[in-house]
Image (cartoon, rainbow, N blue to C red):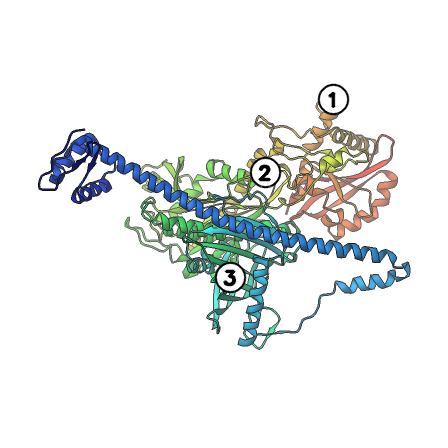
Amino acid sequence: MMALSCKDGKGAILDNGKYVRYTPEQVEALERLYHECPKPSSIRRQQLIRECPILSNIEPKQIKVWFQNRRCREKQRKEASRLQSVNRKLTAMNKLLMEENDRLQKQVSHLVYENGCFRQHTQNATLATKDTSCESVVTSGQHHLTPQHPPRDASPAGLLSIAEETLTEFLSKATGTAVEWVQMPGMKPGPDSIGIVAISHGCTGVAARACGLVGLEPTRVAEILKDRPTWFRECRTVDVLDVLPTANGGTIELLYMQLYAPTTLATARDFWLLRYTSVTEDGSLVVCERSLSNTQNGPSIPPVPNFVRAEMLPSGYLIRPCEGGGSIIHIVDHMNLEAWSVPEVLRPLYESSTVLAQKTTMMALRQLRQIAQEVSQSSTPNWGRRPAALRALSQRLSRGFNEAVNGFTDEGWSLMGTDGMDDVTILVNSSPEKLMGLNLSFSNGYPSVNTSVMCAKASMLLQNVPPALLLRFLREHRSEWADNNVDAYSAAAIKLGPCSLPGSRAGNFGGQIILPLAHTIEHEELLEVIKLEGVSHCPEDALMARDMFLLQLCSGMDENAVGMCSELVFAPIDASFADDAPLLPSGFRIIPLDFCKVRSSLNEASSPSRTLDLASALEVRGPGNKTSGDRSVSSGNARSVMTIAFEFAFESHMQESVAAMARQYVHSIISSVQRVASALSPSHLNPNGGIQAPLGTPEAHTLARWISHSYRCYLGVELLKVPGEGSESILKSLWHQSDAILCCSLKALPVFTFSNQAGLDMLETTLVALQDIGLEKILDEHGRKSLCSEFPQIMQQGFACLQGGICVSSMGRPVSYERAVAWKVLNEEDNAHCICFMFVNWSFV
């Protein structure tokens, strides 16, 4: 290495022929250049030497070596910072795991104690005489009576007492054994996981708990979590009605909170709450909440129309400062959502702790982690937009869709006249607040004259299709369900004001381009812009020559996430894409229903005393289905509810025309979704991805042969037109028969044991859920009376013809049928096996 001269003490110095030492001025100049260009080319390095005289006496090779060393030091610094961050996470996670281990040890000790008490009680019970059985029955009946507590005092002193009690109960759930917690399915703790998530087992209501580490200070965490509408999408509003300071520096707040209903088939929930914020002796920040009920001498909120008053049991957030920055947070959500008030098919949504964990508890952690990452990467450009602005757009889309699904009257929505026979509901909103973002003037000279917004919405039951799979298909193959003419009308309504209904002059869109806009760190939500490329049929029309843009929000795309709903919400948007652009959200929400059931169809099928019921007779197992013993339902057996809502801006004189168009459009979407869902059903897919017929088991072939043979014997005609020979052809023909055919058990309370595809469609159910439906549930009063009068004839003569009437699906929808035939199904020994019903020419009314 050549020695370097030093002029005026400002040159680089060669130290012992090995290392070059630079003067502070040279280091400052090189650092400045490094921040401008960390990896300069050879030409750029020579240019730097010419532009900076203080570096003129340094060889270009030495400059190159300095930049290499500088990049290496920067890389080492970042790696050291990353390792420190991982170490902090592991330390915090280890602390959480140790606390969880202590809690589990306490729980084990408690269970061992209870087990000993139970054994002693059992031994004592065996010594009791049989003469005390009547007394024990009376005693046990009294045990289930709900105790009547006196009203609680809601004066300031009484509220403080309730707050302290709430704090104690919350901490016993967050760190103690007040609730038996089990690990959330599919959640594994680790440094890269969202945290430790658990759900309740055997407690009142539904409860979920999460522990995690976030890179935010405790006060900031509390601020974010208190603002529930910004991260909990189902939260409509939280109103703080009163604030009371406490002597220990805490605050008591009285809150009124409303939650949106997730589907058109349920009613929204509201809560009257007390929230207590305080600091514990160890410096932890605690925010706990509970419902205020049965109180006196204080404020209260009477029942609100169109809402069901739900109960929040002691819940909240325990936030501890973490060494090295950040916070360790414990979240507990515990609610009683009054499941009795929703249709039976929807009750799993309100009785599942898994659902509560997914949509509330884990969502809070995701929001905190998202904001923490945004703070740490605030200098990184994000498509030229602030992350907060992108979150606001996502929130506006989600909130607008929830408003459309719920249609609250206090927001200006009113039901358009209907005969009650259509399953598509039409709502109209003419309030100034709803139209504020739409009545704009545009530079093209067209004033916006829309005076109202219309929403067409409906809900439908889906069978045997994973929600995430269907959602991805709807997102990626819009042309399979969307009407381009209606898209063009929707775009025109918010862009140019005066517009005509879809017709021959509406443009078609030649292609779909998805432009990602933002993605959450947990990859649970995607915000994107959809560009539909226009192909004009009318070159002279400026509108037809334009592309269409949709702002789209997609969530719930993870097929492995248990209990998570999937959403695809979108709204036409102007090409300028302003943050305050007017939005009319439309879209789909798919909510799984059967994620928590346990079925053992294979065990039943292998039992020597098995019967030819639906589970063992026509179970179609796709490649992804699980064997018996799995604690989850295979996707091929799952049900889900899809809610559809579409909004349209229109002029008042076009209301009837737009309503007809909207109703027809939603009907066409329902048909398209049913067709797509059927094609995507795992029960119809073979391992190679093709469609396969539901061939079923040998028992199913036998049952089909018995049904067909008995019909021919009693009525003298063939039930099916079988193209070939053999039981397989009979089963195929029976399965695809257009009339609904259902088999019913010969019991005091008959239940359905088998159905063909038409029967499942009529009852809006699945093969597995069919066995939970009794014959009494689907018949109206006239049908039950007719069946009772004809039942002796069925058993003696072998068959009976029933008059047409009305029955009800599992979703509560009325179904009309022209006539019905009932006949006795005989087995090989000519013994009655079941009763078969055929509903001819059925349709929804």
Considering the numbered disc 3 on the image, is that residue within a helix, a strand or a loop? Answer: helix
Mark 1 or mark 2: whose residue is earlier in sequence:
2
x, y percentage for residue 262? Answer: 55, 52
Residues under labels 1 and 3: Cα distance?
61 Å
Residue at screen point 60% across, 30% down: 685
Q: Can see residue 422?
A: no
Please name the residue that numbered disc 2 is placed on: 465
Q: Amino acid at mark 1?
A: Glu
Looking at the image, do the residues carrying marks 1 and 2 touch, with CB atoms under 8 Å apart?
no
Tell me: 116 left or right of 274: right
Residue 725 bears which disc, if any? 1
x, y percentage for residue 25? Answer: 16, 44
Relative to the observer, which residue lies in front, 723 or 773?
773
Q: Residues within 10 Å of mark 2 (few under 14, many from 20)?
A: many
Q: Residues within 10 Å of mark 3 (few under 14, many from 20)?
A: few
x, y percentage for residue 520? Answer: 43, 45
| Residue furthest out toward the top | 725
Residue 280 bears which disc, if any? none
Please name the residue that numbered disc 3 is placed on: 409
Looking at the image, do the residues carrying marks 1 and 3 touch, with CB atoms under 8 Å apart?
no
Q: Can see residue 787?
A: yes
Q: Is residue 243 above or below residue 598?
A: below
Please tell me whether mark 1 or mark 2 is closer to you in this view: 2
Q: Amino acid at mark 3?
A: Thr
